[in-house]
Image (cartoon, rainbow, N blue to C red):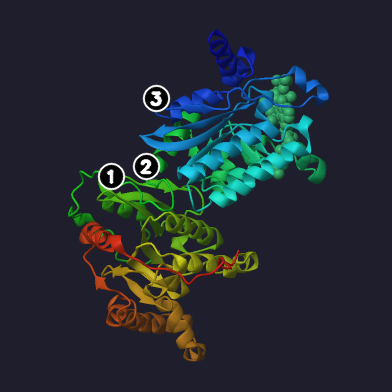
Amino acid sequence: MKRLIAEREKARLGGGEKRIEAQHKKGKLTARERLDLLLDEGSFEEYDMFVTHRTTDFDLDKELFLSDGVITGHGTIDGRTVYVYSQDFTVLGGSLSETNALKICKVMDQAMKVGAPLIGINDSGGARIQEGVRSLSGYASIFQRNIMASGVIPQISAIFGPCAGGAVYSPALTDFIVMADKTSYMFVTGPKVVKTVTGESITDEDLGGASVHATKSGVTHFVGASETEGILLIKKLLSYLPQNNLEEPPLVVCSDPADRLDENLNTIIPEKPSIPYDVKDIIHSIADNGEFLEVQRQYARNIVVGFVTFNGISTGIVANQPNYLAGCLDINASRKAARFVRFCDAFNIPIVTLVDVPGFLPGSAQEFEGIIVNGAKLIFAYGEATVPKITIILRKAYGGAYCVMSSKQLRGDVNYAWPTAEIAVMGPIGAIEVLYNRDLQKMENAAERAKFVAENAADYREKFSNPYEAAKYGYIDDIIEPRNTRFRIIRALQTLSTKKDVNPPKKHSTLPL
Ligand code: HXC
C-alpha cells in the first residue's frame, strides 16, 4: 500500500517540480491540471500510470518517468463519458514514444468500443527523437485509429503547446481543433527549417499561432483566450454532440418558448438589395435563448456555421453572411460549410440553412484556385446528407448558389422563403445586360443605357426576383412571415425527427477532394 501511494505520487509529479514550474511560467497548465478542468470532479479513471519507456539508446534508461509523458483514461463531462489523453510536456517535452503511443491507442480503441467521444490534449515536441522509427510507427498507429473513428465517435483536439512536424496530422484528422491564444502553435515545418529552405524569417506565432490558424488557414475551429477558456469551449461543443453516430444528440430542457415571435425580423432585411445586414442577428433571434456556438468564427466570414438548439434540439446552422463579401460563396466558404454539413450528417444533427447569396465569387483568382472543385464539395455535402434539412431563403438565392444551398432538389426536406426572397438565375442588372446585350451596344450614350437597364431590371425583379415563382413550382414549400421563423423551424424539426432517408450502398463516395 505504501509503495502504491508513493508510486502514484511520483507519477503525478511527471517530469518534476522544476519542469512544472517552467510550464507554469510559460502560461501553460500541466497535463493533469488540464484534465482536472475538463472532467467532472472525481470522475477521472486513469490507465497506465505505471508505464515507462523501453529505450536505452542515448542513455534514456536513466530518464524514466512514470506515465511516460502522457496521461490517459476516461471520465465524464456533464455526466457523459469521454476518453482522454493529455500530453505531459514536463516529461521529455511530451514527446511521443512507442509506449506513449500505445497508451493513446489503448484509449482510442476503448472509446470506439464504448462509443464515447475522444478528446486529445496536445503539448509535445513531436516524435521522441531517441526512439527513431518506433516513435514514427506510434504516430501512424494513432492516425489509423483517427481515421477508423472518424464519423463514428466525435474526436476533439486541444492544442495547448507546440505541435510540429507530422504530429499535426492526428489533430488534423479529428473533427474539431481548439487552440489557446499565444501559447500554442502548429506547423509541419518550423521556423528554422523554413529559414534554411526558403530564406524566410518568421516566428512560431506568425507561422502557426492560433491567430494564423483561425484567420488564414482555417485549421483551428476555436480559439480560447487561455487554456481554461479553450477547455470551456470543448465542454460547450460536446453539449451539442451525440456520444456516437448511432445516438441522437442530447435533448436539452428549453425554457425559451417555441412560439416566441420576433417582430424585428419582419423588417430586418434592408429595403435596398445592395445593403448588407448581419445574419448572426437572425441566428441569435431564432435560436433558444439567443445562444449560438460559432465554429471557425474568423475564417471565411462570408459563411457562418455553428451549433444552436431549437426547443432543445441540437441543430447545425449554415448561413450566408451578407456583411462580408456580400455573402458570396468562394473556395474557403464552400470548404468550411461542406465540412460542417458532413460532420452534422455523420452525427445525426439536423441542418438549418439560411440563404442570402448573390452567387459564387467571380474572378480569375477563384477560378485558378479551383472554385469549381471546391464549390462542388458543398453541393456534394448537402446532396449526400440524410439528416433533416430545413432551408429558409431570406433574400438572394441566385444562380448555382440557389442550387447549392440545400435546395429542394438536393433533398431539402422543408424549404421556406421569406417574402423578401429573390430567386433567379442571376441578379436583375446582370440579367438585363446579358439578355439585351445587342440593344445596349446600339445605344449611343451611357445615360441611355443606364435608363434602359434600370427600367428592364425593375420588370425582371417584378417577375423573377421574388419567392412566388419558385413557390408556384413547389420548390419552396411555403412563404413564411419572418417573425414566425423560430416556430416554423421548431415544428419542422419535430415533424422531421422520425425522417428516414438512405444513400445507395457503396464502399464510399468519390467526393471531389
Ligand atoms: C525528445 C524532446 C523532444 C523530442 C523536446 N524534448 N522535444 N525530447 N524528443 N522530440 C525535450 C528537450 O530535450 C527538453 O528536455 C524538454 O523536452 C523540453 O524541451 P525544451 O527544448 O527545453 O523546451 P522549449 O524551449 O519550450 O522548446 C520546445 C520545442 C523544442 C520547440 C518543442 O523542444 C523542439 O524544437 N523540439 C524538437 C521538435 C521536433 O523537431 N520534433 C520532431 C518533429 S518531427 P530536458 O531534459 O532538457 O527538459 C515529428 C515527426 C512526426 O514529430 C511524424 C509523424 C508522421
Seen as rendered, the residue at the extreme top is 2
Residue pictured at 47% horizontal, 91% vertical: 439
Q: Can you give x and y, in whole percent of width and height, for residue 427 in the image? A: 42, 75
Rendered-image quarter of ligand 1? top right
Q: Is label 2 in a helix, a strand or a loop?
A: helix
Mark 1 or mark 2: whose residue is earlier in sequence:
2
Is residue 52 shown left or right of residue 40? right
Confirm whether residue 228 shows in the render.
Answer: yes
Mark 3 or mark 2: whose residue is earlier in sequence:
3
Amino acid residing under circle 3: Glu
Is residue 150 shown left or right of residue 458? right
Q: Can you give x and y, in whole percent of width and height, for residue 310 in the image? A: 28, 52
Is residue 18 shown left or right of residue 450? right
State if disc 2 and disc 1 touch (CB < 8 Å): yes
Residue bearing the label numbered 3:
41
Alpha carbon distance from label 3 to label 2: 17 Å
Amino acid residing under circle 2: Ser
Residue bearing the label numbered 2:
239
Residue bearing the label numbered 1:
252
Rate crowding at label 2 as few (under 14), some (14 to 19) or many (20 or more) other CA atoms within 10 Å.
some
* The one of 126 and 139 positioned closer to us in this rendering: 139
Amino acid residing under circle 1: Val
